[in-house]
Image (spheres, rainbow, N blue to C red):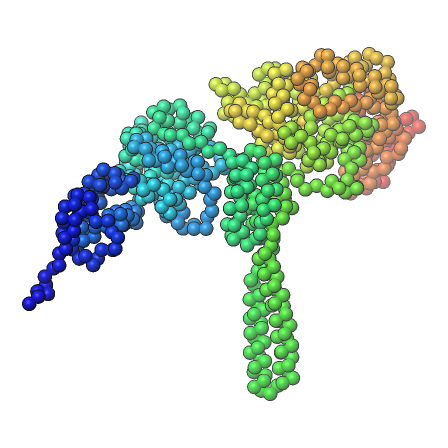
Amino acid sequence: MEDKNKIEYNTRNCAICNDVFLERNRDLLLNGDFKICTKCLFEKIYSGGFTDLRKDDVVSLKSELEERLKNGHLNTKKTVNQIIQQQKEQPAPKIKVGRNLNQAVKEKPDETFVSREKEISEIITVLMRKEKGNPLIIGSPGVGKTSLVREMARQINRGDVPRHLSDKIIIEVTAGELISGTTLRGELEERVQNLIDQFLKDERLILFVDEFDQFVNLNDSESTVDVMGMLKPYLSDGRIRMIGVTTEEGYNAQIATDESISRRLQRIRVEEPDYQQTLKIAKEKKLELESFHSVHISDDLIEQVIELTDQFMTNQRQPDKTLDILDESSAFTASSHFVSEDPITAIKEELKEKIEARNVLIKENEFEKAKEKVNEEEELQRKLKSLQNKKVETSKRVVDIDTVQDVITKRTGIPLIRDITNENYSIVDRLKLWVKGQDKAIEESARFIKRAQYKLSDPERPDGVFLFLGPTGVGKTELAKAIAEELYGSKLIRFDMSEFSEEASVTKLVGASPGYLGYDEGARLIDELRVEPHSVVLLDEIEKAHPNVLNIFLQAFEDGIITDNKGNTIDVKNALFIMTSNAGVDRLMRKPVGFSSQASTLKTSEDVLKSTIDDQTFTPEFLNRIDVRVVFNHLNNDVMYEIVSGLVDQLKDRFAHRGYTLTVDDCVLHKISKDSFDVYSGARGVKRQVERLTDVALNAIGERSVNSFHIKLSEDNEIFCEAH
């Protein structure tokens, strides 16, 4: 009789050594399995028969396989992969400091990233090193350094990495998390040691430190031990693996100077992507932005955004600045077309009440009133449908170029939208309202300014570099103010260059040299242009500046950038530089030019001023970077009368603002223009003469109340005032 409790054992020959071994529960085996004995299986594992297995993997596999082989599971490839997957799926350890980046990216499955295969491959290679497997990612802000680490975590989650890294967990730790709350001596060291112990216990953990340059000098103020000093031994021999992220400036300042740290790290440089790479990244990211904001972003718009940000946001890096502008433009479009749910909800509630009232009226046989309710229901249905259609339309709103330009203008202060096609828009006419008697100088300046207005000037140079030449008081500085007011939104950065007559004064513009007092302080030119890149920079009386000060502007006039004392470059391509000079006026005064406006006389004046500039004042390389040299005329009596009239009109407005009426006879205007005319000082004395009219009017008030003033000229040719 057959024993039902008897266990069936089968024998099989090993496919490698041909030895016979027992095989139990044959029915559990899958067809086509590769059958080998336990001895041969272990030899194959130890000899590297399964790629990318480490020593600790082999140890864990051995114990698992011994158990599984007793049950007849001899499928080697399937078994090994099963065990590795189970190890990978083990829950991540609970940590007190930091966050699990693998888990963080899992929670954002829609987050897109165009992977940079070259940089990701370099990170993987460094992490797989036996020792010093610590990549340090270096790059400018905004080029995607942190995104690389997040993509690395995604690839680990997907299993798109070598088996050696397939079970790794990236733990992000910041300097603030380590140091926050540590008030007593030794608390920081204790916290760091606990972190080290946690990483030593679990070899799956990889330390990720953003802003690594701040992490380097992290220490307890009452202790001589720093964080990096505690980590160094473990980073060297591979017991702890770390990914660091920093900028080029941070690396040079904090890391490169300490060889004991830098030698333990493998630098991986991340460059700013070119146009095509940025376009690819933005197109991938646009799906995420469209879904989040419920907008549509066209590919043509993305191309325009990249071009605009490259031209007007040169102090930031791609792709960060393009994605920022797309995100903000989408947010603005979404908010400006927002349709509230409140009106729709209110109409639905009202419609429900109408229906209930209609049903009650029908039950009470009030059919006429019920009919009225039906009409009201139909009207509410039309309103509801209209609002719902409007909401559907807004869900398909499109981000347009005008919105993008408006956002960039708010970010940079550079006006990208200007009605330059309007026939009433005339730069010359508007500037002539400010400056009298200098029509030729205005027209010559406006000709070059118009290039910048139409964005047709050289994009690698400033909007313009002007040199205004002429006697004092003829309107050079006033024209610069007018250009700033009318075309640059009143943004005028003015320097009196007589303050820069010494060589050391260059530090006022770009900062002190290393090792000198004030190195860490700001510099006026750099700071103001960084805040307002779209400005008029007025360098008044440029001939009084030291030659070394002028050399600072050679790079600005040629390449549109200025380098400060720390090596940082400031973009000045959207600024207009205007220099004024009185050089050569003394030679002009010795010539019998007079004050006529004949063409021959003007030509002679121009030749004298320009030849003086060429011969005496500036170097050839400086002069060759100037776009136009504008010569201002001497003023005559007619021009002086126009200037006086304009100033008196301003004075009348001030009186009217205070509730008074001011009348000034024409003969008074002629007297002021004649008395204030001076060939050497130009119109500088006019404003003082006009302001004296205020004193004349106030002297006429006396003890009585008045509300009008009439300024006249007496028979003795004296100015007096009648008050009423």
Q: Residue at x 54, y 35 (%)?
A: 274
Tell me where residue 352 appears, x and y as whole percent. 55, 74
Question: Does residue 704 show up?
Answer: yes
Quarter occupied by residue 351: bottom right
* Placement of the C terminus among the 4 image quadrants: top right
Q: Residue at x 64, y 24 (%)?
A: 558
Tell me where residue 425 appears, x and y as whole percent. 77, 40
User: What is the residue that sits farthest to the bottom in this orientation?
Assistant: 365
Q: Residue at x 62, y 71 (%)?
A: 380
Question: Does residue 231 show up?
Answer: no
Q: Nearer the viewer, residue 307 or 406?
A: 307
Quarter occupied by residue 584: top right
Q: Nearer the viewer, residue 646 or 710?
A: 646
**152 vs 499: above or below:** below
Tell me where residue 407 appears, x and y as whole percent. 60, 43
User: What is the residue that sits farthest to the right in this orientation?
Assistant: 715
